[in-house]
Image (tube, rainbow, N blue to C red):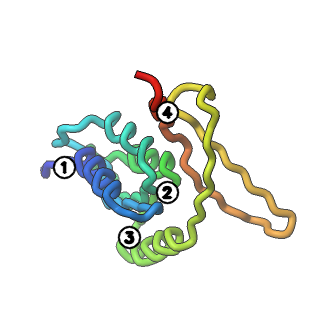
């Protein structure tokens, strides 16, 4: 059985994306969701993702009998970041999944919001709803949470 450092890979991928100059960032993760060799813990990855602007798209490839698989991790990483998780049943589905991810990346919009400083703790939860009387079937994917860390007051010591 192989060794997989998934938490380290996701954490390092998010760190690498921070170096990019563009606002929209995406991490495409192809994995079974299992981890048996990371130095980082799962919570460190979640905390890093909460502070990241990246959207995670996960593609879960695994044998259903594999004891190391963790589709729940792939779903959570995707949901928290506003991305999607896919679980193809056969290799032929991969092309359409990749096309769908590419289209999603090209058609994303950014909506900004600055919360009041006294609005809860550092971990904030988000819910966005969209309605349109003339357009049915709208789909909105957003982050479900983010970490808000106030900038220190420049005048205080």
Vertical position of residue 41 compared to residue 64: above or below = above
Among the 4 quarters of the image, the one containing residue 73: top left
Q: Is residue 110 left or right of residue 57?
A: right
Picture quarter containing residue 111? bottom right
Residue 59 % position (x, y): 38, 61
Of all residues, the one furthest to the front in this rendering is 155
For the residues labelled 2 and 3, the Cα–Cα distance comes to 21 Å
Say which residue label 2 marks: 83
Give the label, 2 or 3, closer to the camera.
2
Residue denoted by label 4: 150
Image location (x, y in percent) of residue 22: 42, 64
Q: Residues within 10 Å of mark 2 (few under 14, many from 20)?
A: many
Q: Position of residue 41 (x, y in %)?
A: 27, 35
In three-dimensional space, the C-alpha distance between marks 3 and 4, rounded to whole angstroms, equals 46 Å
Q: State which tag comes first along the sequence, 3 or 4.
A: 3
Q: Which residue is mark 1?
A: 4
Q: Residue at x 49, y 69 (%)?
A: 105
Residue named by callout 3: 90
Labels 3 and 1: the sequence-earlier one: 1
**Badge 1 element:** loop
What is the CA distance from the residue labelled 4 to the residue labelled 1?
36 Å
């Amino acid at each position: 059985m192989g060794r997989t450092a998934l938490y380290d890979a996701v954490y390092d991928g998010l760190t690498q994306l921070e170096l990019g100059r563009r606002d929209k960032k995406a991490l495409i993760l192809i994995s079974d969701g299992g981890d048996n060799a990371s130095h980082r813990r799962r919570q460190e990855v979640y905390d890093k993702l909460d502070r990241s602007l990246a959207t995670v798209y996960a593609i879960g490839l695994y044998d259903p009998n594999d004891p190391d698989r963790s589709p729940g991790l792939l779903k959570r990483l995707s949901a928290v970041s506003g991305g999607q998780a896919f679980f193809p049943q056969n290799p032929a589905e991969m092309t359409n999944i990749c096309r769908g991810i590419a289209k999603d990346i090209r058609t994303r919009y950014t909506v900004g919001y600055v919360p009041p400083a006294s609005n809860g703790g550092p971990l904030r939860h988000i819910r966005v709803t969209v309605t349109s009387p003339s357009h049915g079937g709208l789909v909105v994917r957003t982050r479900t949470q983010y970490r808000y860390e106030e900038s220190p007051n420049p005048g205080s010591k």
